[in-house]
Amino acid sequence: MDEVFKALADSGRRRLLDSLNARNGQTLRELCSELDMARQSVSKHLALLEGANLVTTAWRGREKLHYLNAEPINATAERWISRYDRGRVHALADLRHALENAPMDSNAFVYVTYIRTTPEKLWQGLTDPAFTRRYWGLEFATDWQTGSAMSWEGEGMKTSDPGQVILESSPYRRLSYTWHTFTPEWAKAAGVDDETLAKIAVEPRSKVTFDIEPAGETVKLTVVHDGFEPGGTVRTMIQEGWPALLSSLKTLLETGDTLPDPQS
C-alpha cells in the first residue's frame, strides 16, 4: 500500500494515469507525445506505477501497451473507506471510480491482482465448481481441454452454444475461453432488460484470458477480457463486474470466505 501512495504523490505520474484513463492501452511513444514529457521521465514514472501495480502492460506484436489496473485502488478503498469518514477520502473514491468505471477507447479490459495462494489452488478457484459457485454463483460444464465446448450453469439456467469453447488450457499457467451467449433466459436471470439484450446479442463474442505467474509467496493473476465492439455495451457491463468478482475470488482463496453481497 505504501507503494501506491508513493506513486500517486507525484503530479507527473497522476498525469500519466489521467492519460490512460482517457485512452487506455497506449505505447510509451504515445504517452510521451500526449504529455509532452521526455521519454526517460515517462519510462521512470511508468516503472514506479508498474511497481505499485497501478499500471500493467501487454504486448501487441512489437508494441508494449500500458493499461490502468484498478485493483490497488479497489483494495485501498475497501480497507480505508469503511474505517473513516467518506468525505475525508473523497479524492481516493473519485480516483477508484474513474479507474473502474470511466469508458476507455481501448477494447481490452486488463486487471492484475496478487493472491496469497499457489498456482494449483488458483487454477482450482477458476475451474472447480465447488469454488466458482461460491464467488461467481455459477459453474462451468467442460473438461477444460483446448477446443472443448463449455456450458455456463447457474441461477437455475444453463447457457450452451457451439461458440462457447476453451481456447487455451495450460493448467496452473494460462486459461482462455470465449464469453457466454446472451440468451433471453440468461437476461431474465441476470435482470437485463429487452432493450439491452437486443444490443448485446448482436455484438461480437468476446473472450477472457487468465495468466497465472508465481510471485514469491503470492501468485500474480492477470485477467485480459477483449474482443469487444468498440464502444459496445458488453464492454461497459463487464468493466463493472470484474473488479468485484476478482476481489471475491482473492478473498475466498486467502481466507476461505467470500465478500458480502453489496445488495444484501
Image (cartoon, grey):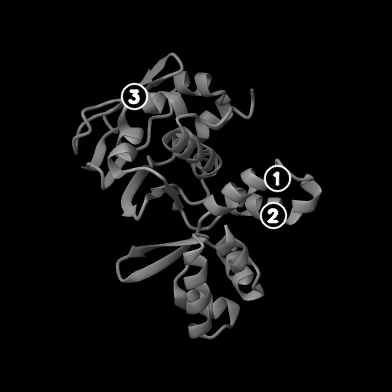
Report helix, strand or loop for mark 2. Answer: helix
Residue linked to disc 2 = 92
Q: Secondary structure at mark 1?
A: loop
Quarter occupied by the C terminus: top right
Q: Secondary structure at mark 3?
A: helix
**On the picture, is 214 further left or further right than 253?**
left
Q: Quadrant of the N terminus?
A: bottom right
Which residue sits at x=30%, y=67%? 61
Relative depth, front residue between 99 and 54: 54
Q: Is residue 176 above or below residue 131?
A: below
Q: Tell me if I can see residue 211 in this picture.
A: yes
**Comparing marks 1 and 2, which lies closer to the viewer?**
1
Of pointers 1 and 2, the one earlier in the residue sequence: 1
Q: Position of residue 248 (x, y in %)?
A: 50, 35
Q: Residue at x 46, y 75 (%)?
A: 28
Residue 147 is labelled as none
Residue 224 in the image: state x and y as whole percent.
40, 50
Disc 3 vs disc 1: Cβ atoms closer than 8 Å? no
Structural distance between the alpha carbons of marks 2 and 3: 36 Å
Q: Which residue is mark 3?
A: 129
Crowd class of label 2 (few under 14; some 14 to 19; many from 20; radius 10 Å) = some
Q: Which one is earlier in the sequence, the residue at label 2 or at label 3?
A: 2
Mark 1, other Cα within 10 Å: few <14 / some 14–19 / many ≥20:
some
Question: Along the line of sight, which residue is nearer the eye, 32 or 260?
Answer: 260
Q: CA distance from mark 1 to mark 2?
A: 9 Å
* Nearer mark to the viewer, of 3 and 1: 1
The amino acid sitting under disc 1 is Ile
Question: What is the quadrant of residue 121 in the picture?
Answer: top left
Do the residues bearing badges 1 and 2 touch, measured as CB atoms within 8 Å? yes
Q: Please state which amino acid type lies under the numbered disc 2.
A: Leu
* Residue pointed to by mark 1: 81
Q: Position of residue 250 (x, y in %)?
A: 46, 40
